[in-house]
């Protein structure tokens, strides 16, 4: 623990703010958590972060919707959402949080933005608001940017992920680096807040573009009747110059569909644009359509339509083993299947019910009877708990977008996306 800091305020207690709070608490700091919706935060804690409950009971973690408690903190970490509005950056959560913070700012506090955003936000959006306090940045208060790199559901603990830090002055950088060094195994200082902001956008644009490229190759491989999965496995034996990415139904979640558009937007302010980001967005938008267009082939029906075809979608979250449907491509898939008048149901152990448009769907238990009555099982998310062999043994047809059926055999006819034909036809 940093000797001069005992309390840290975390503003915005969601997917980022709660793990950050936990890390601060584990390192011995008390945490003041501020969120506009403390009741939903408590529900989220009970369901997904139960280890935080004991800190609440011990009074080490105090949650409120009121900013006044921030007065007691030596550092304030801002983890509020940075979404899009009409495809453009919407920073109102950040500016609202800063305005609400203003009356409670104290000399010597560190204020660090963790939300993903475009280069220039810390200096051009944050500083003008904070300076209204009359406190001088770099002298009375210390301001910086440290992008959150958390990967929900992954094996990396937050502490292990190297933490980029930046400051608006050298003193700001020094104080912020010192604080973060007490929490993270590796701290990586960079020369400016703009570099830190841009690095986060590079990281997520890199993922968007590479996933989109491999999705485009999956579409090409379907047309060429070549197995994209075998091609990737072969390519990744090269020990340098190739990093594997894997196809899927598209891009979902909180960051990868959003952050590259922040980058393209700030580029447009400089009279430039990223053709790669625009192409990637377009290709991902085509994946649901591609899958739906392949289903009649997988079903081996003479019919080109899907009217009255029963489709059971397995996995609806945007990510494996993670209970979040934010931006999941399943929403597009359901809409397209409904337009084709297919009869849709789903199974997901993490999502008991799913509202699409005005219709509520409930997760269907996987039984022999259910599988026998379904025309096509469509694997969308590859949760570890999905009983692949059971599906192979009891389903009629499986359309697999994630290659999870690769090492299995059974009664079902299997069509793996990106291979262009039914597996049985390949042998
Ligand atoms: N979720 C991720 O995996 C992830 C990873 C890296 C970076 N990020 C970035 O971190 C930021 C936060 O994302 P998240 O996923 O935690 O969002 P989230 O939606 O899960 O949580 C944000 C929380 O902030 C609260 N909030 C909104 N406005 C507020 C305000 N003015 N004052 C106090 N609380 C407020 C909301 O009620 C909500 O509980 C975003 O910029 C996101 O892009 C997210």
Image (cartoon, grey):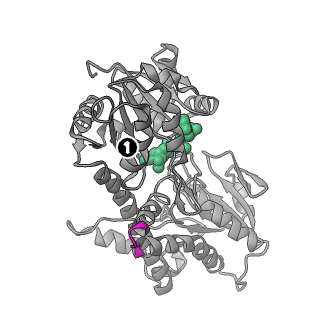
Is 134 contained in the magenta span? Answer: no
**Residue 282: percent from left, percent from top:** 52, 74
Quarter of the image that includes the N terminus? top left
Is 272 contained in the magenta span? Answer: yes
Magenta residues, dominant SS class: loop
Residue 382 vertical position relative to residue 34 in the rendered view, above or below: below
All told, the count of numbered labels is 1
Q: Which residue is drawn at 64% across and 66% down?
A: 333
Q: Is residue 114 visible?
A: no
**Residue 256: percent from left, percent from top:** 46, 58
Res 153 → quadrant: top left
Q: Name the residue under label 1.
A: 155
Q: Which residue is drawn at 33% across and 56% down?
A: 198
**Residue 111: percent from left, percent from top:** 37, 34
Res 289 → quadrant: bottom right
Residue 211 vertical position relative to residue 348 in the rendered view, above or below: below
SS of the residue at dot 1? loop
* Mark 1 within 8 Å of ligand 1, using the beta carbon: no
Q: Is residue 350 visible?
A: yes
Of 194 and 205, the residue lying toward us: 194
- What segment is highlighted magenta in the picture? 269-275
| In the image: residue 8, left or right of residue 180 | right
| In the image: residue 322, left or right of residue 38 | left
Q: How crowded is mark 1: few (under 14 residues within 10 Å), some or many (20 or more)?
A: few
């Amino acid at each position: 623990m940093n000797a001069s800091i005992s309390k840290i305020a975390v503003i915005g207690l969601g997917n980022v703010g709660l793990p950050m709070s936990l890390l601060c608490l584990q390192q011995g700091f008390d945490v003041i958590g501020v969120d506009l919706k403390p009741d939903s935060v408590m529900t989220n804690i009970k369901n997904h972060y139960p280890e935080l409950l004991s800190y609440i009971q011990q009074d080490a973690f105090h949650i409120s919707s009121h900013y006044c408690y921030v007065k007691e903190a030596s550092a304030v970490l801002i983890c509020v959402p940075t979404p899009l509005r009409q495809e453009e950056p919407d920073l109102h959560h950040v500016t609202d949080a800063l305005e609400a913070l203003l009356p409670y700012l104290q000399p010597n506090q560190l204020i660090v933005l963790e939300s993903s955003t475009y280069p220039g936000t810390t200096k051009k959006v944050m500083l003008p608001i904070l300076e209204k306090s009359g406190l001088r940045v770099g002298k009375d208060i210390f301001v910086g940017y440290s992008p959150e790199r958390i990967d929900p559901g992954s094996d990396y603990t937050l502490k292990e992920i190297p933490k980029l830090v930046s400051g608006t002055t050298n003193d700001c950088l020094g104080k912020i680096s010192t604080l973060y060094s007490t929490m993270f195994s590796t701290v990586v200082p960079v020369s400016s807040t703009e570099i830190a902001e841009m690095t986060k956008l590079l990281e997520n644009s890199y993922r968007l573009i590479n996933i989109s490229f491999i999705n485009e190759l999956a579409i090409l491989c379907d047309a060429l009747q070549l197995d994209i999965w075998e091609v990737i496995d072969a390519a990744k034996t090269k020990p340098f110059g190739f990093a594997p990415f894997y196809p899927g139904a598209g891009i979902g979640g909180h960051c990868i569909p959003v952050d590259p558009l922040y980058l393209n937007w700030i580029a447009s302010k400089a009279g430039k644009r990223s053709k790669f980001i625009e192409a990637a967005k377009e290709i991902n938008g085509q994946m649901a359509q591609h899958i739906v267009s392949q289903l009649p082939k997988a079903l081996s029906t003479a019919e080109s339509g899907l009217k009255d075809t029963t489709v059971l979608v397995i996995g609806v979250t945007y990510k494996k083993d993670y209970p979040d449907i934010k931006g999941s491509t399943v929403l597009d898939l359901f809409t397209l299947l409904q337009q084709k008048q297919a009869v849709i149901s789903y199974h997901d152990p993490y999502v008991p019910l799913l509202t699409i448009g005005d219709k509520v769907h409930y997760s269907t238990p996987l039984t022999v009877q259910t599988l026998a009555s379904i025309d096509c099982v469509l694997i969308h998310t590859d949760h570890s708990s999905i009983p692949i062999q059971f599906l192979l043994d009891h389903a009629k047809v499986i359309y697999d977008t994630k290659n999870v059926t690769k090492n299995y055999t059974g009664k079902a006819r299997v069509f793996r996306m990106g291979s262009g034909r039914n597996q049985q036809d390949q042998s």
